[in-house]
């Protein structure tokens, strides 16, 4: 009996130790991070009072009566996610306006006070169980409705958040991720992130937690760095600690993304979660007007880019005013899933081998000055979707050296485009500049065109070649453009044959 008691005591101690080990990030993936990496691909769902008021952000004064979906169907949302091959659903439970999609006893600014009283959090959580995918929640730190938010003592509002998060984590089953937003409105130390993290891990040690704009240039200072700059370990610092992953909505990491970040002299492992919109307009909340979706080619290349190197991607597919995901948007993500051959039982697919990264490049011209490095030709293959080559002539070209022993059969080109702001103050229309172009390779001392188009390029042009080519030099020529042409990235890729 005594041995049994000792054994049980040792087991409890071991379990407590394991739980303690996952309470903080570490130099290697902790329990929550490993689970997050395994998920890899999720569907973001923005839905709330903004959906019914043509808003992206609102200030907490919109009347509760305006939330009024005519055919609310959260089961359809999650069924769409399942059919599209998503591994998890990330639901916006409360945005900056403070409106809650569940019946919270701490506020009357919620669905229970609206014309349609369905507990949306519960409905989505139940549908996730039904369809066998994981449930995650977005919760805004910044609450423009709640009175305690303006109290001089920041703990008053922290207590409000802890009460609401306790509701979420105790009433809706297992939650795999907590995505926090709006931290810019207060000092990082005033949010009680350590208290939030401790509460979450109490209910689910495997739940990954983070705050948007997680990392900064200097410790203790709000000097931000873009994810595309994070190409060196132990150079950048936590703004919000503890956190399990990095967020910078809607920025994209590089092909050389690093994972080690500093807090008080210690290094911690941090994967990155990307967020993109299904809409070409970059709207998060659905509007009354139908909006075009991204091309499947662009979606596929962004999928590969974003899920590479143990990082993750969530795609926003928002329900409309009826309370359903629009059929054409559902079809888009379902078609993408079929193209990628996604399955819960298989690892996420990978892109082919990039043979173009950081190869030598020369440009016919560079915007501002030929000696200018800010828009130099070498930026078209630096693995960074924030940097770009820009020409100073509408007819221009770049030449890229390649290893003549390496074959390729796909080329992806990301074009910089002009943008036009829409009336909601957030969304944008992007307009391509390049109207006619060709891709040429050097063969036996002569240029040979392997692709030509007289149609606008768009966000991402994917050229799939019917056979593999080898060359020591590739040329991209802009033959017609409405403005000075500019390219983020030209990726020359060897894609393996499908089995």
Image (cartoon, grey):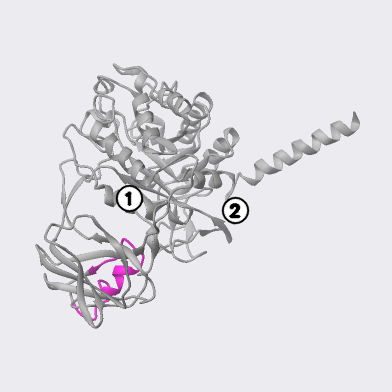
Label drawn at residue 300: 1
Q: Earlier in the sequence, mark 1 or mark 2?
A: 2
Which of 372/81 is in front?
81
Name which residue lies at 34% across and 18% down: 113
Q: Position of residue 208 (x, y in %)?
A: 51, 42
Q: Looking at the picture, does residue 56 appear above or below residue 107?
A: below
From the viewer's perspective, is 290 left or right of 176?
A: left
Say if the magenta span includes residue 373.
yes
Q: Secondary structure at mark 1?
A: helix
**Going by the image, does 233 lie left or right of 480?**
right
Question: Which residue, given by chain and number where applicable, does mark 2 sit on?
Answer: 26
Q: Residue furthest bottom?
A: 445
In-front residue for pair 444/161: 444
Residue 48, quarter of the rendered image: top left
Rendered location of residue 400, percent (x, y) = 29, 75
Does 105 lie within the magenta span? no
Rendered position, 384 above or below 403:
above
Front-most of residues 241 and 415: 415
Label 2 crowd (10 A; few <14 / some 14-19 / many >=20) = some
Residue at 19% of width from left, 42% of height from top?
A: 292
- Quarter of the image holding residue 485? bottom left
Residue 118 appears at what percent x and percent y? 36, 18
Q: How far from the left and from the top, in percent, is residue 330?
A: 29, 34
Mark 1 closeness class: few <14, some 14–19, many ≥20 residues within 10 Å: some
For the stretch drawn in magenta, what is the main secondary structure?
loop
Q: Can I make out residue 22 in this image? A: yes
Tags 1 and 2 in contact by the CB under 8 Å rule? no
Q: What residue range appears in magenta?
A: 369-389
At 40% from the left and 62% from the top, the residue drawn is 255
């Amino acid at each position: 009996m005594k041995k049994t008691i000792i054994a049980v005591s040792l087991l409890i101690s071991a379990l407590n130790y394991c739980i303690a080990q996952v309470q903080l990030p570490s130099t290697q993936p902790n329990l929550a991070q490993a689970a997050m990496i395994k998920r890899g691909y999720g569907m973001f769902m923005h839905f709330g009072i903004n959906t019914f008021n043509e808003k992206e952000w609102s200030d907490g004064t919109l009347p509760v009566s305006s939330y009024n979906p005519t055919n609310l169907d959260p089961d359809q949302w999650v069924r769409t996610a399942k059919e599209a091959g998503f591994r998890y659903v990330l639901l916006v439970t409360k945005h900056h306006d403070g409106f809650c999609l569940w019946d919270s006893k701490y506020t009357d600014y919620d669905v229970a006070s609206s014309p349609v009283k369905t507990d949306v959090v519960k409905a989505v959580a139940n549908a996730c169980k039904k369809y066998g995918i994981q449930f995650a929640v977005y919760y805004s730190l910044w609450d423009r409705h709640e009175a305690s938010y303006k109290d001089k003592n920041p703990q008053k509002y922290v207590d409000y958040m802890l009460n609401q998060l306790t509701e979420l984590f105790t009433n809706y089953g297992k939650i795999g991720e907590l995505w926090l937003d709006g931290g810019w409105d207060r000092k990082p130390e005033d949010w009680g992130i350590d208290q939030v993290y401790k509460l979450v891990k109490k209910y689910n040690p495997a739940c990954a937690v983070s705050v948007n704009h997680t990392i900064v240039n200097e410790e203790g200072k709000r000097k931000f760095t873009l994810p595309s700059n994070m190409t060196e370990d132990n150079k950048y610092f936590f703004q919000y600690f503890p956190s399990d992953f990095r967020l910078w909505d809607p920025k994209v990491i590089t092909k050389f993304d690093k994972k080690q970040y500093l807090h008080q002299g210690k290094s911690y492992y941090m994967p990155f979660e990307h967020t993109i919109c299904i809409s070409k307009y970059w709207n998060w909340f659905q509007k009354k007007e139908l909006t075009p979706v991204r091309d499947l080619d662009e979606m596929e290349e962004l999928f590969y880019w974003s899920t590479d190197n143990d990082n993750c991607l969530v795609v926003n597919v928002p329900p409309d005013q009826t309370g359903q995901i629009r059929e054409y948007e559902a079809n888009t993500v379902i078609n993408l899933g079929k193209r990628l051959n996604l399955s819960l039982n298989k690892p996420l697919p990978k892109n082919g081998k990039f043979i173009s990264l950081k190869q030598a490049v020369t440009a016919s011209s560079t915007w501002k000055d030929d000696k200018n490095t800010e828009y130099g030709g070498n930026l078209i293959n630096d693995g960074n979707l924030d940097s770009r080559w820009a020409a100073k002539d509408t007819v221009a070209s770049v030449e890229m050296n390649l290893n003549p022993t390496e074959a390729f059969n796909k080329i992806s080109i990301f074009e910089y485009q002009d943008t036009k702001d829409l009336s909601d103050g957030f969304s944008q229309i992007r307009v391509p500049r390049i109207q006619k172009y060709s891709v040429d390779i050097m063969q036996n001392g002569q240029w040979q065109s392997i692709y030509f188009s007289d149609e606008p390029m768009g966000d991402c042009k994917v050229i799939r070649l019917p056979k593999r080519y080898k060359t020591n030099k590739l040329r991209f020529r802009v033959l017609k453009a409405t403005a000075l042409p500019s390219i983020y990235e030209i990726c020359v890729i060897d894609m393996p044959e499908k089995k």
